[in-house]
Amino acid sequence: MATLSPLQQARAGYPPKLPAVLAENGPFVALTESEPTTSVADADEIRAQFPQTYGLPVVTFAPGAQRDTEPLVVGVILSGGQAPGGHNVIAGLHDGLKDLNPESTLLGFKGGPQGLMKDRSVVLTEAVIDAYRNTGGFDMIQSGRDKIEKPEDFAATVATCARHGVRALVVIGGDDSNTNACLLAQYMLDHQTGIQVIGCPKTIDGDLKNEQIEVSFGFDTATKVYSELIGNIERDANSAQKYWHFIKLMGRSASHIALECALQTQPNICIISEEVAARRQTLKQVVDELVAVIRARAEKGRDFGVVLIPEGLIEFIPEMQALIHELNDLLSEKSPTKPYFDSLTHGDERLQCVSQKLSPSASQAFSSLPLGIQLQLLGDRDPHGNVQVSRIETEKLLIDLIGDALQEHKVAGTYKGKFSAQAHFLGYEGRCAAPSNFDADYCYSLGYTAAALIGGGKTGYLSSVRNLCAPASEWEAGGIPLTMMMNLERRHGAAKPVIRKALVDLDGKPFKTFAAQRQAWAEGTEYVYPGPIQYFGPPAVCDGVSQTLRLERG
């Protein structure tokens, strides 16, 4: 980063805030512990797989006395997709370790878990850290989506740690990455390596949360970036008044991003996948509801609008969900069909192969889709062997189906408007933005908390900072056992222990607030234009939390 923009130069000097317990005591805290915890589901199976970390108590920090601490060597990796604020987690971890003992060393492993296994290490000095404070991206040490899961992977990890004298590892990642951290912590205990493992909650999707993890880092910044862009599109729609804009937003497993952006921008329509699933809506019913709004607006001379679509919508539609589950099993690595399927080189051959193997209902759902969507469903799988939903162009699928339905209404004389659509996918635009003041503070606190947990001898924990709607000085810091968030899910055709994703709560205040207003938004033009993230100015402009967090916790 030889050339810095004026904003980067100004942001470099921003001092992130800490909870009072850390600002006043540093990492020398007393640890108060709750009663033993249980997993969110499948307790017997989770306990059997994690016998030494299951049931750990929730830890909360209290003021403690300074003590002599020997120098520590700690390793850190960034795992999974990027999220704004990752560099500040590392900065907080670095500063916390140096406050424990100035001779402590922080090693970064480049490229995520694979960098750890292959020992692609770099010493993260003060100069390196200072160059990345308050910046977006993961480019300090890059990220990766590999997993440490095979015996040789664990052995390679231990060998790397032994080579450098690493006493603790910090995994900065989402639910899958921290599931891997839980496995790693158990392995280190089983083999008596003496290596601690701490996780930090990262994902812009917002689906890694519970009572102790109020929000994952990056969600605040990413949704503010998306909302700025949506507001810009809304203003363009209202200016030209001739296009319907269909905007797909990240969030495969939950609709938190779509809901937050809707609360910030007030579009005409926002689909919430969890509601579609709860109502057991078919794809046709989803399309019919969209068509109804478009026709109603056309009757008022408003042949324009904005629709927000969660990335994972198609997986929440019951007949599509059943189809995708069958495809995942049919094309899993353990399926006898997989080798033959892989040998086929033409799309029509692959379509025929799959159609013959599906159940009648799944085959009917599959054949009802446009050819392009069918081929996307048969494309490369994700690391878990599942359909890569982000590659399915749901926004274009809806545009096609709506266009067909409106043409039928036009022929029947029940629609006289004009339907011209634009498709957008907002994804990578938000993942590496410079963190908002909230994320800059929150991430730094998470990293510093991880250092305090290491100093307190803990392992198998996720760094936790709570009471986030209050000023940072009133935030509460501590740790939550990774096993507490786990359940069993089907991966590669088998039940695997994973951290359970948090879905949009249809009885929660954020969704109910949205639901109470959406009819007015559909009929009128109630757009809100949030504008870009502000880093300098009044606290009401610069330090505000997301609407979701404010409604849930404020």
Image: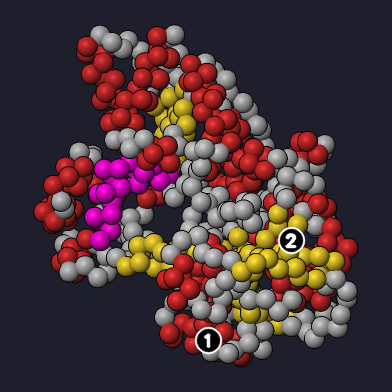
- In the picture, measured across the screen, residue 158 lies left or right of residue 320, that is right
Tell me the kind of residue under disc 1: Asp
Figure check: 462 above or below 387: below
Q: Position of residue 535 (x, y in %)?
A: 76, 43
The image quarter in which residue 36 lies: bottom right
Q: Which residue is mark 1?
A: 190
State which region is magenta: 311-329
Which residue occupies 77% across, 74% down? 97
Find residue 107 and report its image quarter: bottom right
- Marking on residue 525: none
* Image spot of residue 509 (x, y percent): 58, 36
Name the residue carrying label 2: 477
Instruction: Name the residue located 46 percent from the left edge and 61 percent from the top edge.
Output: 41
Q: Is disc 2 surrounded by few (<14), some (14 to 19) or many (20+) residues within 10 Å?
A: many
Q: How many marks?
A: 2
Q: Secondary structure at mark 1?
A: helix
Amino acid type of the residue tagged 2 in the rendering: Ala
Magenta segment's dominant SS is helix
Identify whether 211 is placed above or below 102. Answer: above
Q: Mark 1: give few (<14), some (14-19) or many (20+) Cα within 10 Å.
A: few
Residue drawn at (76%, 70%), measured in percent from left and top? 31
Secondary structure at badge 2 equals strand
Q: Position of residue 345 (x, y in %)?
A: 18, 60
